Image (tube, rainbow, N blue to C red):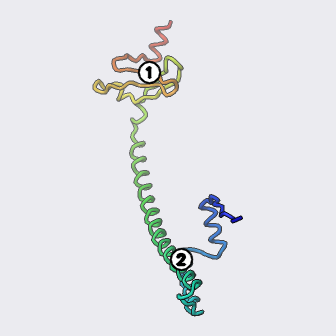
Amino acid sequence: MALKPRLVPVGVGTIIKNVKSQGVNGVEDLKERVAYLQGLMDGFQIRDDTEQGRILREITKVLGAVADHMTVLSVQQQEMEEYLAVLDEDLADLEEGFFAEEDFFDDSIDIACPTCGELVSVDGRIMNDAEAAVEIVCPGCGDIVFTPGDELVADEDLEEMED
């Protein structure tokens, strides 16, 4: 009966923990260790004409390629982190300018859904724009709360009408 290898999903955190526990502390350290292995093979005069020699030589080539690829990934990650930091700063500047407008929240109108009673906040500028044919839909029940041409009644006026 032949044993079949079992694949177990491993998270990135587990991989990093395992690599660090084996004494690898970064890409440069990995490259140094691969070079050390290649030096050992040369020092022990492991020949490429034996099966074991060919396997070991190929393993060190693959490890070298992995280390080179890790170097590229490390540089790309650093560039991506710098790019994201710049984007974050730009977004913060935009947010600051956008939310700093004093009239941003002043023009909002709360409309109570006639079906479920949920309050729906809407930008008043949209409601007053005759060209914008916008229907406002309640996020709670999905019914239409406002359609173009509807007249809004203020709470104070509504209370007077009920009296």
Residue 73: give its label: none
Point out the residue furthest to the front here: 1
Left or right of 89 on screen, residue 51: right
Q: Image quadrant of residue 100?
A: top left
Residue 67, horizontal then vertical, whole percent: 51, 75
Residue position for label 2: 63
Q: Is residue 157 or residue 60 the one in the foreground?
A: 60
Q: Amino acid at mark 2?
A: Leu
The N terminus: image quadrant = bottom right
Residue position for label 1: 145
Q: The residue tagged with tag 2: helix, strand or loop? A: helix
Residue 130, horizontal then vertical, whole percent: 29, 24
Q: Looking at the image, do the residues carrying marks 2 and 1 touch, with CB atoms under 8 Å apart? A: no
Q: Amino acid at mark 1?
A: Val
For marks 2 and 1 on the same chain, the one whose residue lies earlier in the sequence: 2
Residue at image x 64%, y 76%? 23
